[in-house]
Amino acid sequence: QTGSAPNHPSDSEDDEYITNVSIGTPAQVLPLDFDTGSSDLWVFSSETPSSSARGHTIYTPSKSSTSKKVSGASWSITYGDNSSSSGDVYTDTVTIGGFSVTGQAVESATKVSTQFVQDTSNSGLVGLALDSGNTVKPTKQKTWFSNASSHLAQPVFTADLNHQADGSYNFGFIDTTLASGPITYVPISTGNGFWEFTSASYAIGGGSSKKHSTDGIADTGTTLLLLDDTIVDAYYNQVESAQYDDSQEGYTFDCSEDLPSFSFAVGSSTITVPGSLINFAPVDGNTCFGGLQSDDGIGISIFGDVAIKAALVVFDLGNKRLGWAQK
Ligand SMILES: CSC[C@H](NC(=O)[C@H](Cc1ccccc1)OC(=O)N1CCC(N)CC1)C(=O)N[C@@H](CC1CCCCC1)[C@@H](O)COc1ccncc1
């Protein structure tokens, strides 16, 4: 058995990638943000204050004949950007790309932070990191993929994200036609509950590769590519008009500049992010914001959407490994 669901950018900046998910009986369809950087499936619901839920599609458990309340269960999560949400828990049937999981924990939001209220492009998240990161108490719940994996043809899923175009999340199979190059696999370390791997070197433009060990996570829920300051400073040293903009909290540059590519090692291969993907978004006039920025303060590097857009990424739970193929 397999599943295949399209995704699309949430806005003109590729800030998030949205996929429609069916919950309950009859199906209630919500636009959700698939996040390989967290492990909770949570939704705006009939329990979310209506002032907060305005503009969002909601899940109403009482309208679903297959919903069950998980008595005494609650959840609360804070993300890397300090957005947060919390609430109580139901189980229900959740279908993604034609593949249904029954008894899936659907975390209903009774509280959401301002960022979520304002971001009407999603009605919640589908966490696709490891089960250990789930926040439900007193009993941790499994992710949709974890529940699905034992019934899928293969315990894998792939992320294909594209700049200003549709992509896909495929479950249980790998469509190698989505890639231009071979898939290179690297082992993940599971201790922090992320799809965490180590990249041994990087290169800027056509330059020589520099040995630099990066411990990072493959994270579809993070917009940018967030790496160590030394790498980021070295990159923007190659961009004539680049400067660090305190108000924007990141490097900006003249939108008309041709940006160098950025390559990172995956095992014995490399993935190259074209400069066009690093010219992330205009901030004002002809000043643009970079898609490569510092990971300062997070304690880990994040290969977010800017990096994932350059590749087909294979999340292989069965073999505890991550695969990257150039697109
Ligand atoms: C340093 S993780 C920062 C990251 N959040 C982002 O990437 C947000 C995403 C966004 C949100 C709303 C509108 C537009 C874009 O976007 C930006 O922060 N930016 C994009 C726009 C740009 N101009 C400024 C920078 C983040 O918490 N992700 C988590 C999922 C995310 C939460 C917010 C809603 C969308 C999904 C998750 O995977 C990673 O959780 C952790 C990572 C590390 N330890 C703890 C948690």
Image: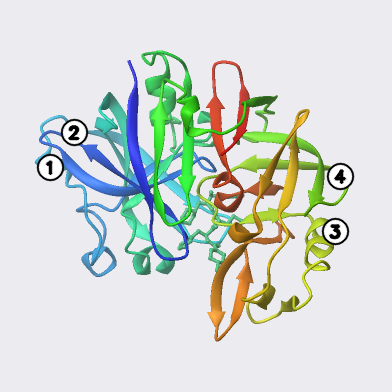
Residue that numbered label 3 is attached to:
230
The residue lying toward the viewer, choosing from 23 and 15, is 15
Residue that numbered label 1 is attached to:
62
Q: Judging from the image, what secondary structure is the residue with disc 1 in?
A: helix
Q: Residue at x 39, y 22 (%)?
A: 147
State the separation of the CA atoms marked 1 and 4: 57 Å
Q: Given the image, on which type of amino acid does mark 1 rest? A: Ser
Sequence-wise, the earlier of marks 2 and 1 is 1
Q: Given the image, on which type of amino acid does mark 3 rest? A: Thr
Residue that numbered label 2 is attached to:
67
Q: Residues within 10 Å of mark 2 (few under 14, many from 20)?
A: many
Res 209 label: 4
Q: Position of residue 122 (x, y in %)?
A: 34, 56
Q: Residue at x 54, y 84 (%)?
A: 284
The residue lying toward the viewer, choosing from 133 and 199, is 199
Q: Judging from the image, what secondary structure is the residue with disc 3 in?
A: helix
From this view, report whether residue 177 is shown above or below residue 310.
above
